[in-house]
Image (cartoon, grey):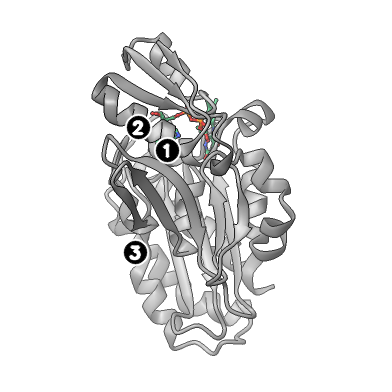
């Protein structure tokens, strides 16, 4: 049975009442395929598309940018606030899959479905985003770094709806970039970098799609702490390349349709170079 709530409160109440026999439906780009293939089966589908409060993109009092979970990749890519404050993220959204997926697929949907070969989760980890979840008893925030816990698995409880993704304010001079590569419609590997001249953490560098959840390249981040904030790209890359290559080698990647484990590890270094170059040029 299809339900079409028009408010968040109504959507949450329906889910609480119907329990595990019901699922949320946003753009349907993943869900409908899984339902048709009988990979997933539900007695009730709660279509949340009419819940307007899940569509807002606005600044919060603490300066964070709130992106409502129903925002499609296309809307995010063309939103003036996202373009001004997070140009790297707007650019990522403009290159997800193909125009049909970008127009229908939502940010909440890609996060909740948790197919590892996705772009947004990697970038949101590098941007330190907070995932806002709600059920009938209240709301809670989960750091994006803790949201994905495995392949098709997240920290969201079954009765929780993903309300928004809140990206904290970036510092003056922060630059972010994301570089993916793949030969299917989904990325084989993606790397997100945030270079922060004034931040207490100079570099946040994450890779995604290589394993089930995004991975921080912690050693590279440590080494970057000792680099001058205005260092030219060549100097930064001389210091970081061997560290990133060694760290990529340690990732427990596997051979699959997207490429061999060795190929994916090699891509991590190549894409890290491109993302850093974009940040520092
Ligand atoms: C052909 C193809 C190519 C793709 N390529 C890429 C790519 O290159 N990069 C990339 O990043 N992604 C890619 N994707 C994934 C795409 O980003 C997602 O399909 C899309 O964003 C999912 O959003 P949706 O609104 O359609 O989710 P739906 O299909 O409606 O839902 C997906 C799942 O999330 C749950 N859900 C949805 N919204 C919420 C919510 N607010 N709260 C709680 N649960 C929720 C649903 O119950 C369901 O289980 C691709 C998808 C396809 C089909």
Q: How many marks?
A: 3
**Disc 1 vs disc 2: Cβ atoms closer than 8 Å?**
yes
Q: CA distance from mark 3 to mark 2?
A: 46 Å
Residue holding disc 3: 247
**Residue 20 % position (x, y):** 25, 24
In what element is the residue under mark 1? Answer: helix
Q: Image check: 54 left or right of 103?
A: left
Precedes in sequence: disc 3 or disc 1: 1
Circle 2 SS class = helix
The local secondary structure at tag 3 comes to helix
Q: Which x, y percent locates residue 259?
A: 42, 36
Residue 116 in view in this figure = no
Q: Nearer the viewer, residue 119 or 138?
A: 138
Most foreground residue, 78 or 121: 78
Vertical order, 123 against 26 (above or below): below
Name the N-terminal-most of marks 3 and 2.
2
Q: Nearer the viewer, residue 253 or 28?
A: 28
């Amino acid at each position: 049975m299809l339900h079409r709530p028009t408010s968040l409160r109504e959507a949450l109440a329906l889910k609480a009442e119907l329990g595990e026999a019901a699922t949320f439906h946003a753009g349907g780009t993943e869900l409908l395929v899984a339902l048709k293939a009988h990979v997933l089966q539900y007695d009730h589908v709660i279509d949340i598309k009419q819940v307007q409060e899940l569509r807002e993109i606005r600044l919060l009092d603490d300066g964070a940018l709130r992106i409502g979970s129903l925002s499609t990749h296309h809307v995010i890519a063309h939103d003036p606030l996202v373009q001004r404050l997070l140009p790297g993220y707007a650019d990522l959204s403009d290159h997800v899959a193909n125009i049909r997926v970008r127009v229908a697929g939502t940010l909440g949907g890609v996060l909740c479905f948790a197919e590892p070969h996705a772009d947004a989760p990697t970038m949101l980890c590098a941007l330190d985003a907070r995932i806002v979840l709600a059920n009938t008893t209240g709301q809670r925030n989960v750091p994006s770094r803790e949201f994905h816990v495995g392949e098709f698995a997240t920290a969201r409880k079954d009765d929780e709806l993903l309300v928004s993704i809140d990206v904290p304010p970036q510092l003056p001079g922060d630059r972010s970039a994301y570089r993916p590569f793949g030969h299917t419609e989904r990325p084989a590997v993606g790397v997100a970098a945030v270079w922060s001249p004034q931040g207490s953490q100079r570099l946040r560098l994450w890779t995604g799609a290589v394993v089930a959840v995004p991975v921080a390249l912690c050693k590279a981040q440590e080494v970057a702490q000792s680099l001058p904030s205005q260092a030219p790209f060549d100097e930064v890359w001389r210091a970081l390349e061997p560290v990133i290559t060694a760290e990529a080698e340690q990732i427990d990647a596997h051979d699959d349709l997207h490429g061999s484990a060795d190929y994916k590890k090699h891509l991590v270094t190549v894409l890290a170079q491109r993302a850093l170059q974009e940040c520092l040029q």
